[in-house]
Image (cartoon, rainbow, N blue to C red):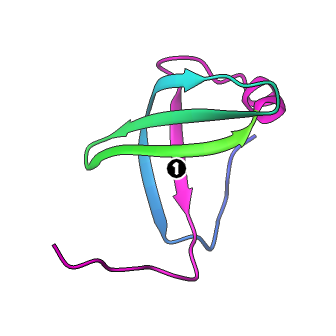
Amino acid sequence: MSIQAINVRNQFKGKVREIIRGDVVSEVDVETPWGIVTSVITTRSVDSLGLTIGSDVVALVKSTEVSIAKL
């Protein structure tokens, strides 16, 4: 399967760095040139996508809210 087009503008190509598996959900850390992006997805999705350490992936970020905190 290949993606022809997608409306999500925030896309980060990277490699899977770590997978922390849970019974229902798993954390997937993706190493990108801009830093680590962490996604929490179902463990079933991890398996059906065949994600392993080193897999080439694209992290797609779509958000309706961005919060700012003053440092």
Quick one: label 1, few (<14), some, or many (20+) residues within 10 Å?
Answer: many
Label 1 amino acid?
Ala
Q: Residue 68's image quarter?
A: bottom left
Q: Which residue is drawn at 53% across and 37% down?
A: 57
Q: Which residue lies furthest to the top in this view?
A: 53
Look at the image and say whether residue 47 sits in the magenta stretch. yes
Q: Residue 48's image quarter?
A: top right
x and y, in percent, of residue 15 in the image: 43, 30
Q: Which residue position is annotated with label 1?
A: 59
Q: Could you say whether the residue bearing mark 1 is in a helix, strand or loop?
A: strand
x and y, in percent, of residue 7 in the image: 62, 74
Q: In this view, does 40 lie above or below 49?
A: below
Q: In this view, does 53 lie above or below 7?
A: above
Q: Which residue is drawn at 44% across and 79% down?
A: 66
- In the image, taking residue 23 as reference, residue 59 lies left or right, namely left
The residue segment tinted magenta is 43-71
Q: Residue 20's image quarter?
A: top right
Q: Residue furthest left?
A: 71
- In the image, taking residue 48 as reference, residue 12 lies left or right, namely left
x and y, in percent, of residue 25 in the image: 74, 35
Q: Nearer the viewer, residue 71 or 38?
A: 71
How many marks can you see?
Answer: 1
Q: Which residue is drawn at 67% across and 22% down?
A: 21
Q: Nearer the viewer, residue 2 or 7?
A: 7
x and y, in percent, of residue 41 in the image: 70, 42
Look at the image and say whether residue 65 sits in the magenta stretch. yes
Task: Name the quarter where the C terminus is drawn.
Answer: bottom left
Q: Which of 70 and 34 is in front in this view?
A: 70
Task: Name the quarter where the N terminus is drawn.
Answer: top right
Q: Which residue is drawn at 20% across and 79% down?
A: 70
